[in-house]
Amino acid sequence: MMNEKYIAINQLGYRPNDAKLAVIQGKQSKYRLVAIDSEEVIWEGESSAEQYDEASGVTVCKLDFSHVTREGRYRIVGEEGSSWPFSISSHVYEDVQVAVLKAFYYLRCGEELTSEYAGPWAHAACHHSLVHVHGQPELTFDGTGGWHDAGDYGKYIVAAGKAIADLLLAYELYPQTFKRKVPLPESNDVMDDLLHEVKVELDWMLKMQDAATGGVYHKLTTLQFPPLDMMPEDDTSDLYAMPISATATASFAASMAMAARAYAAYDEHYAERCLLAAERAWQWLEEHPDVEGFRNPSDVGTGEYGDSQDEDERYWAAAELYRATGNDKYHAAFLRYAKRSSFNKTSLGWADMGGYGTMSYLLCEHKREEAIVSELKQALSSRADQLADVSSKDGYSISMLPEQYRWGSNMDVMNHAMLMLFAQHVEGHQRYEGVIAAHVHYLLGMNVNGISYISGYGHSAMTHPHHRPSVGDGVDAPVPGMVSGGPNKNLQDEYAAKHLQNRAPAACYADHEDSYATNEVTIYWNSPALFVLSHFTSL
């Protein structure tokens, strides 16, 4: 008998030397690890004592079989059933890591996705009409390219900033894992595929900078969302660039400064273009020190990505520009923001970018103010310790408090793992390694819902994302490699409000296309997952 929620595991499996956990909804008991092919009992052990897990609303115990390192296919067997089959293998994450990167290709806008690269998820080119600047109808420009942000077809600069940061940081810290080809239409032996894919987004972002001022338009969308089953090539409503915002301009400046460093060895002209764009954006920020946060115009109903606080984005932009240029004016600006307490300096969300400024400064090769370095290292270590402590008490061994299961909770799960990985990198230890592994196990099935939150990967994987091409393409399987938003206790869509009442926070999830508040996909949920998986495919 199989009962995947009774024994929740990482449905792909575990690397031989990683921490290996299963979480069992039931009583303390003995469990057997059985080889699939031979039915040999490899190991028998007793679970931990039961504990009530507030976040998931169930009583659980844990089975730790970390000492089992023999590669093979296994299942865990208990009194009330067995787990899904899983592997112990050095290469267990390689395919899913590539798939999570390939998901960005499937989100490309403005070009045909051919069956050679997109398989059954191919579709025609989309969104190629000229873009109108909202409120300035006489202004139009070419806004083709980039990635659709999420389940809709909008393209948003602040969302892009987080995704670009995660991807380029992954490439910087784990370059060897990106030697494998995805492949992509641009694949060659000159530049790795991650840089090819990121350039698709950067090229679009460059089009979003106002030539006259250097400021950056906040987003590019139609006025309203199209129907859920509409394919991108059928979405022919007029396109609009929404007004310039400080958060978009600062995120753009930071992203372009990162790109200038990343592409310098491959395309010097392109790197110079990115740096010039970053510096022009910074000039706009200096000329506009106090800017109201972006709000949708009254006739616009697409994602707002509003944010009244822009000091964290300016902090990040100053750090990246200093790292890219060594120019003292950027260092001075960074230090001004670093000494302010108006924003969190370890957060990694699209609206709270302080952590990226901190990471940039701690990686910087230029002269640094050691007191600030020490202060930022301390903040990073303190936050990582706090997350590890929460994980040690959680029923599923992750760093989420019950109240943190909000829209996009899986982003927070991966952001936390990313922060702990960076803390390890800075301090030169591996103290959080087992905790970080548990976050990957959670994403791939070791959760109260018994589901892998990555489409196409796992025996019981997310299958019905709120993602227009996956709904409208007539293909039963969803686009693979996409990370679901995950449990959201706030029940912020009609489907969730109707079907998930009275559930515990971590159980407030529906694998249904109508549940956009629990099961949408976005570029900045995939991006921290790629960072974390890259750690586990590079060692």
Image (cartoon, grey):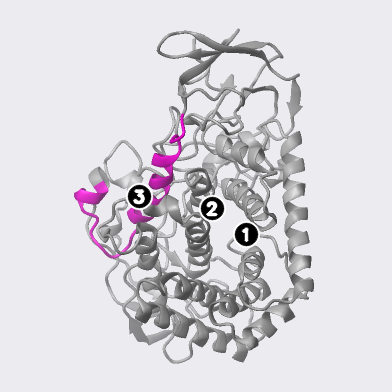
- Does residue 244 lie above or below 454 as drawn? below
At label 2, counting other C-alpha atoms closer than 10 Å, the crowd grade (few under 14, some 14-19, many 20 or more) is many
Mark 3 residue type:
Arg
Q: CA distance from mark 3 to mark 1?
A: 27 Å
Judging by the rendered image, the residue that carries numbered circle 3 is 180
Count of numbered badges drawn on the protein? 3
Q: Is residue 190 left or right of residue 455?
A: left
Residue 170 place in picture, x, y as percent: 50, 57
Image point (35%, 59%), residue name: 192
For label 3, count other residues whose C-alpha is less than 10 Å away and answer few (under 14), some (14-19) or many (20+).
few
Q: Which callout, 2 or 3, points at the residue further toward the start of the chain?
A: 3
Q: Position of residue 387 (x, y in %)?
A: 72, 46
Quick one: label 1 or label 2, which is nearer the N terminus?
Answer: 1
Q: Is residue 512 above or below residue 295?
A: above
Among the 4 quarters of the image, the one containing residue 377 = bottom right
Q: Which residue is more in the foreground, 82 or 140?
A: 82
Disc number at residue 528? Answer: 2
The residue at which mark 1 appears reads as 348
